[in-house]
């Protein structure tokens, strides 16, 4: 059976994916969520002409030339504006953010003025509109400022708050159940037996899920037998998981039972095995509404497949219109690369800038898919297409940043 190209695998994973239901979240709890509807301002910002500096509000015509002496008639502070009107020969002490009084059309900076009782000498000429923020210079009431599908980072949360929103319409977080498989696995902190290793995949995948906007659900470790796998599957269903991620056991060896167990339970297998390295034994299918992604057991393969396929699936469920966007960028090789074989390679690499500011990607030592240390210190995946010829240092390449 021919191996499925990476682009085709991603297209099949994202096919017919609809965004999850919308719900309301208090703005204080909405960071990292995804907007389920466009967000319009409920107010105009600023709602009035406001001073951009500390100084004196006045009529520009009264200070067309300097020096000029005006009579001080009051003060306008943020939250406590001057309620009167500035007339000819008059001025109001004003502070940053305060409403500009009626009649005034300019601000003279405090360092350009000298006060003596109620007499203020303006040493600089005034210009109409100078140091005044007009009403609505930031945004107008009813203006759509945040689009549907926007991930709510700190900047977007700040804008939504300024727009007057106390709650936000967001997509429900995708529930991602994670089931590690293998007799050889124990949790971190437990003492492994003589033939066992410490499980790491579930934790790196859970961190990726949470960082992408999903809700990770740890189902623990299933041993290599059908009853344990069936219990894990039931736990995923009970948790109402949108995605079940399994790690290990996706091949067809005597102890690789995951695919058989899932098919026995009714999984519709879409594909198994793709033309990439690391990550060839990737499996994808569905069991009712729950999508199933079977990842390889090797830690690097598991993470790379999660990065390339699970993260876009989560983004699609969150309604991100750019879920399938090509996020790669151009760089230059920092070391020569040999000719590639029939599978796309996603090599771990570090990034730096050369003297000209060009981005340089240098592959890390060994690309063995069990070496987690090098993955942790890599900055990017260096993409080598199938049958790519040998390339010298300095040749152009494509990379995907891991951060």
Image (spheres, grey):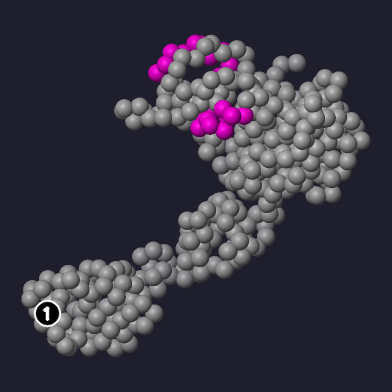
State the residue position of label 1: 121
The residue at 63%/41% (across/down) is 208
Is residue 385 on the magenta stretch? yes
Name the quadrant containing residue 58: bottom left
Q: Residues within 10 Å of mark 1 (few under 14, many from 20)?
A: some
Instruction: Classify residue 68 by image quadrant.
Output: bottom left
Q: Quadrant of the N terminus?
A: top right
- Tell me the magenta residue range: 372-396
| 139 relative to 57 in the view: left or right | right
341 shown above or below 22: above
Q: Which residue occupies the extreme right position in the image?
A: 227
Vertical placement of residue 90 versus 26, above or below: below
Q: Could you tell me which residue is drawn at 72 percent across and 39 percent down?
A: 188
Residue in the foreground of this view, choosing between 191 and 327: 191
- Is residue 309 in sight in this rendering? no
Looking at the rendering, which quadrant does residue 300 occupy?
Answer: top right
What is the x, y in percent for residue 144? 49, 60
245 shown above or below 333:
below
Under circle 1, the secondary element is strand
Q: Position of residue 346 (x, y in %)?
A: 57, 24
The picture places residue 161, in percent across and down from the top left corner, at 50, 65
Say whether residue 267 is left or right of residue 36.
Answer: right
Residue at x 58%, y 16% (from the top left corner): 386
């Amino acid at each position: 059976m021919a191996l499925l190209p990476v682009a085709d695998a991603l297209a099949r994973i994202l096919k017919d994916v609809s965004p999850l239901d919308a719900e309301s979240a208090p703005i204080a709890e909405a960071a990292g969520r995804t907007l389920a509807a466009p967000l319009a301002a409920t107010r105009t910002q600023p709602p009035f002409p406001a001073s951009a500096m500390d100084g004196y509000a006045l009529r520009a015509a009264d200070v067309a030339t300097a020096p000029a002496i005006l009579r001080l008639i009051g003060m306008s502070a943020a939250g406590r504006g001057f309620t009167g009107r500035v007339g000819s020969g008059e001025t109001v002490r004003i502070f940053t953010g305060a409403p500009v009084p009626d009649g005034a059309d300019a601000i003279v900076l405090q360092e350009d003025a000298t006060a003596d009782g109620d007499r203020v000498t303006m040493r600089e000429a005034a210009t109409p509109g100078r140091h005044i923020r007009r009403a609505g210079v930031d945004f107008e009431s009813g203006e759509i400022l945040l689009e549907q599908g926007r991930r709510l980072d700190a900047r977007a949360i700040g804008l939504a708050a300024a727009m007057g929103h106390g709650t936000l319409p967001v997509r429900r977080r995708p529930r991602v159940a994670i089931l590690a498989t293998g007799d050889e696995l124990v949790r971190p902190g437990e003492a492994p037996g003589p033939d066992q290793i410490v499980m790491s995949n579930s934790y790196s995948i859970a961190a990726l899920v949470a960082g992408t906007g999903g809700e990770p659900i740890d189902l623990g470790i299933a041993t290599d037998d059908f009853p344990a796998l069936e219990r894990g599957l039931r736990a995923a269903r009970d948790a109402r998981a949108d995605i079940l991620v399994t790690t290990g056991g996706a091949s067809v060896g005597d102890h690789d039972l995951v695919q058989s167990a899932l098919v026995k339970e009714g999984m519709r297998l879409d594909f198994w095995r793709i033309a990439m390295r690391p990550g060839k034994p990737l499996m994808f299918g569905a069991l009712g509404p729950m999508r199933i992604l079977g990842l390889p057991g090797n830690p690097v393969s598991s993470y790379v497949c999660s990065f390339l396929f699970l993260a876009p699936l989560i983004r699609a469920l969150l309604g991100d219109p750019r879920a399938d966007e090509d996020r790669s960028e151009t760089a230059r090789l920092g070391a020569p690369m040999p000719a590639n074989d029939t599978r796309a390679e996603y090599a771990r690499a570090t990034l730096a800038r050369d003297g000209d500011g060009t981005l340089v990607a240098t592959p890390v030592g060994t690309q063995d898919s069990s070496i987690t240390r090098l993955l942790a210190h890599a900055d990017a995946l260096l993409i080598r297409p199938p049958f790519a010829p040998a390339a010298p240092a300095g040749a152009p390449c494509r990379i995907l940043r891991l951060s």
